[in-house]
Image (spheres, helix red, strand yellow):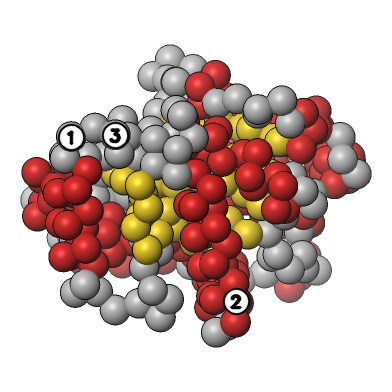
């Protein structure tokens, strides 16, 4: 796609064309050059949107909880966008489960925009282009973004770099495996939710969670809420808790720091992906393949391979005679 076409699509999305926004997000996922063009176009845009990350183990009810919160979030922010990361199809590469199918916009119409994103093998619970998608939604005037992570367990920590507030959703009985999990998700959370709290084990899960959280240091007090998302029990208390966290975090300057962290994360991931692409290109090239085969055959050293690789990764000087 030509850059001019991308710019026209972005302009239409910013003007409020939902179909253009959806198409642009699809192109960002599929075409790295489109993502690069969009990032460049939005480089001067200051991040403003509140991002509520919703993470937790599979089956915790994250999608149901988000769906149930939409009426409350839109009442507070006017409108809400949802980014839900799903496993990737091994055939198409697209989102396998499709959280848009499991979520409902509660009859809120244009006040809600729900988008599934394919994880494409990423290990941190988010899709490769999640940061750029957030940047686009922010620029398009969505003041609140609910970000649902894949749900892969204790290593799902990328959400910390992108979210204004991280909400960890657990179920009763999660305490049975608490020691194995607390070093991951519990350290990522700002707010904790015991969903399906009408099930046996909710009180023990709360006790285990409180015990673990008491060992952590936090600039904003960490609260635990109990909900039954399917009946919306406890949802208002949870939303008030989220709003209270945002207010306190804003007053002490934590929101500003998190917005800066989001931009830093975007820059870092962009550089990482560029290096990975150039590394793969070197690996697939005749030169790189020959160097690898030499090392494997014992005719070269790993240090020599690294030196040659870094030479190829180094930007080449411009040819002054052609300028």
Is 248 rendered above or below residue 239? below
SS at badge 3: loop
Residue at the farthest top position: 91
Residue 280, image quadrant: top left
Is 18 rendered above or below residue 147? above
Q: Position of residue 189 (x, y in %)?
A: 36, 60
Residue drawn at 71 percent across, 25 percent down = 107
Label 1: which residue? Answer: 200
Please identify, in this view, whether the residue under mark 3 or under mark 2 is nearer the observer: 3
Label 2: which residue? Answer: 250
Please identify, in this view, whether the residue under mark 1 or under mark 2 is nearer the observer: 1
Label 3 and label 2: CA atoms lie apart by 33 Å
Residue drawn at 44 percent across, 34 percent down = 229
Label 3: which residue? Answer: 198
- Image-based side of 191 in relation to 130, left or right: left
Residue drawn at 54 percent across, 35 percent down = 68
Looking at the picture, tell me which residue is in the foreground, 37 or 65: 65
User: Is residue 150 in view from this perspective?
Assistant: no
Q: Quadrant of the C terminus?
A: bottom right
């Amino acid at each position: 796609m030509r850059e001019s076409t991308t710019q026209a699509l972005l302009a239409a999305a910013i003007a409020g064309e939902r179909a253009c926004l959806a198409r642009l997000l699809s192109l960002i996922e599929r075409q790295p050059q489109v993502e690069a063009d969009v990032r460049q176009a939005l480089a001067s845009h200051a991040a403003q949107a509140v991002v509520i990350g919703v993470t937790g183990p599979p089956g915790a009810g994250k999608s149901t909880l988000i769906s149930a919160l939409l009426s409350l979030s839109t009442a507070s922010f006017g409108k809400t966008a949802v980014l839900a990361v799903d496993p990737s199809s091994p055939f198409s590469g697209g989102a396998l489960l499709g959280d848009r199918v499991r979520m409902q916009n509660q009859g809120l119409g244009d006040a809600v925009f729900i988008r599934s994103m394919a994880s494409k093998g990423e290990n941190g619970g988010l899709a490769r282009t999640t940061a750029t998608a957030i940047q686009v939604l922010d620029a398009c005037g969505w003041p609140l973004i609910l970000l649902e992570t894949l749900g892969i367990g204790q290593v799902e920590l990328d959400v910390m770099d992108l979210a204004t507030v991280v909400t960890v959703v657990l179920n009763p009985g999660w305490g049975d495996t608490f020691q194995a999990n607390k070093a991951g998700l519990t350290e990522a959370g700002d707010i904790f939710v015991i969903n399906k709290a009408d099930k046996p084990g909710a009180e023990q899960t709360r006790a285990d969670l409180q015990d673990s959280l008491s060992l952590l240091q936090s600039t904003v007090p960490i609260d635990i809420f109990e909900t039954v998302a399917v009946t919306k029990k406890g949802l208002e208390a949870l939303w008030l808790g989220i709003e209270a966290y945002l207010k306190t975090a804003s007053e002490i300057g934590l929101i500003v720091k998190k917005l800066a962290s989001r931009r830093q994360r975007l820059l870092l991931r962009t550089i990482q992906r560029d290096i990975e692409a150039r590394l793969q290109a070197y690996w697939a090239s005749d030169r790189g393949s020959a160097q690898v085969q030499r090392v494997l055959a014992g005719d070269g050293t790993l240090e020599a391979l690294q030196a040659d690789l870094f030479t190829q990764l180094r930007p080449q000087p411009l040819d002054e005679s052609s300028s």
